[in-house]
Image (cartoon, rainbow, N blue to C red):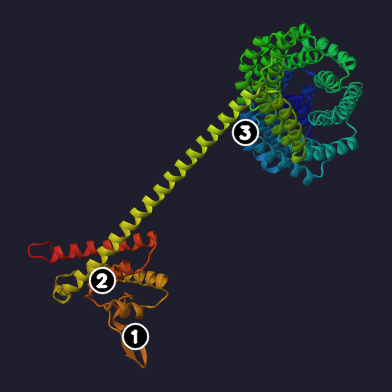
Amino acid sequence: MTLHKLLLSSLTLFFVPLIPTQANEETALKTCASSLKSKEVSTAVTICKQQLKASYAQDNTEQNVRIMLQLASLYSQQGKKAERGNLLGQIRNSQPFERHSDIQYDWYRAMGADYLHDENFQKAEDYFRTAYNIAQQLSDINKKSRSANDMGLVHFKQKDYKAALLFYKESLELKETIGNQYYIGTTLNNLGLLNRHLKDYSQSIHYYEQALESFLEYTEQEHFDQRVFNNIYHLYEDLAVTYSLAGRSDKGDIYTQKVINTITKKLRNNEKVRALKNLAIIHIEQKDADGAETFIEQAAEYATGNNKYLAEIDYIKASIAHLRHQHDQAKVLLQQATPLAKNNDNNLLLEQIFYLQYTMALADGRLTDAIDAQSQSYRYKELNLKKQYQSDLQVIQEQIKKEQVERQLVTEKLKSQEQKNQIQSLSNTVLIISLILIIVAFSASFVIYRKAKEKQRLVESIQSHKEKVLLLESEHDQETGDASAEREDDNLGFRQLLVELLIETLALWEKTTQSDRIELAEKSGIWKVSIDDGRLRTRSLDKYIDINKIPQHPRWRNVVKTSHYVLAECPLDSDDRNALEKKLEKVMQLVKMRSIKKAPGGIS
């Protein structure tokens, strides 16, 4: 059963009539909800729209939201994604959504169903899990049973079959407690599908037959949901395929005839394509090329422009051509199918395509082509096994079989062909190794070049700062003579900047050398170190790290020389070096501007 069918069978029946607070609201909801079960979709949409219009006239917001949920379910069946999305958006922004947990529950399930249909399984799981948690909080057995089924669906689509099985079993136990045969049949149907994917066909048939029995029993009730017939149609199809896979063609033929009898009632082309395609596969397995061709040609008419089915149709046509020994035609069809299957990430179909290529190549005596195709087939088989069983055991078993077949084919090859392959393999190995060595050598050269450039830049920077220290030491202090030309507000900002620069310089010195300011003063020779009460002190330096103590007319060169000294002598990382250099440059720019103002004819 496909994802779309699962959604129809499991998610379109969750909008059951809720228990409103007023009699007129109950009547409106029953009318809309009952139309979901007993009317054609288009008719049900009309009825729900009429009820929604009447509800708007009564200005009943809660009733509006509940009918909108019903209408959104119908839009899903019609494939009207935009209209459904618009309704769900209105519901999410409504006041009833914030007040009523049951409305939140239905909304999160609806969003999960949309993401599941779009194959965004992680998003779908997030929304379904939120709904599942709400159902647990409400202690509502109906909601818990539906949400457990939802969680099973999304885990099934993610190939997590163990988790899917646990959620399905949980859902089935709750539904059996409720006693609703429609709901029970839905989960039994899902269990049948899961076991078919695990290739346990007898168990799959067991669940499918139980599901069919539940659905048929449900139709004997009064006022039953007419949508159950859609589930019954799909079960006929699944049983026909599964019985054929199990080698019981007699039983498969019975259900095949039931599918043929009901296929004209299907309204959607994709459902017709799927059913006809599966019937064609059954006839191929029975070596009936003519019967298979009849069904697949009909399927192709309904699948125009749908890449999802075109790849499978080409493969089935190739299988028919193989049955008729028309291998050239089969090869052309398989070449068409392969890129489409890869685009759809259909590993199962790719496994079948390459296995058919292997079978034809072996039959034609093309041993090399047979080995290549067989290798590709097993590669995709391993991918499928890993997804299905999540265990390396099956992969190892298939690998052993693969190696046995490969050894058998290799021994049948001509010696000249074997030597040619060995030479080609050796050449490819040498080429790959050469390319790897070239890439490694290039990468190493690039890294060495970058490090050399970085080292050169650092050396130049350090040398520059050493030269600046010497230059500043050779200049005569002029701070005292300049004092009268300074404006008080400019001087305050300048002194503040000097304090910040020296504080940051001292912090980097202590960070990189693990020593204190006294050692900096002694090693740089810039600041005086005195002895007071037997302790070494740096009184002049200490004044320059406090804005309240720094002289009114500071000796800025001492601060600048200190920063240059740290930049030249300390192993700073690039971020610290850049930060200090920027602050130092800011001080020097201010010094330059102050000098211009003080110069004769300068700005006063």
Is residue 157 something one can see in this rendering?
yes
Q: Secondary structure at mark 3?
A: helix
Determine whether label 2 and label 1 are within 8 Å by CB. no
Location of residue 343 in the rendering, given as x and y in whole percent from the top left corner = 60, 25
In the rendered image, which quarter contains the N terminus?
top right
Q: Is residue 297 left or right of residue 507?
A: right
Q: Amino acid at mark 2?
A: Lys
Q: Which residue is mark 2?
A: 561
Q: Secondary structure at mark 1?
A: strand
Q: Amino acid at mark 3?
A: Gln
* Residue farthest toward the front in the current orientation of the protein: 415
Q: Which residue is mark 1?
A: 537
- The residue nearer to you, when weighing 92 against 131, is 131
Q: Secondary structure at mark 2?
A: helix
Instruction: Measure the C-alpha gap from mark 2 to mark 3.
Output: 68 Å
Determine whether label 2 and label 3 are within 8 Å by CB. no
Location of residue 369 in the rendering, given as x and y in whole percent from the top left corner = 64, 21
Residue at coordinates 72% horizontally, 36% vertically from top-left?
386
User: Residue 564: which numbered mark, if any?
Assistant: none
Q: Amino acid at mark 1?
A: Arg
Image position of 476 with respect to 589: above or below: below
Q: Earlier in the sequence, mark 2 or mark 3?
A: 3
Residue at coordinates 29% horizontally, 72% vertically from top-left?
562
- Based on the displayed image, in which of its 4 quarters is residue 173 positioned? top right
User: Residue 90: which numbered mark, if any?
Assistant: 3
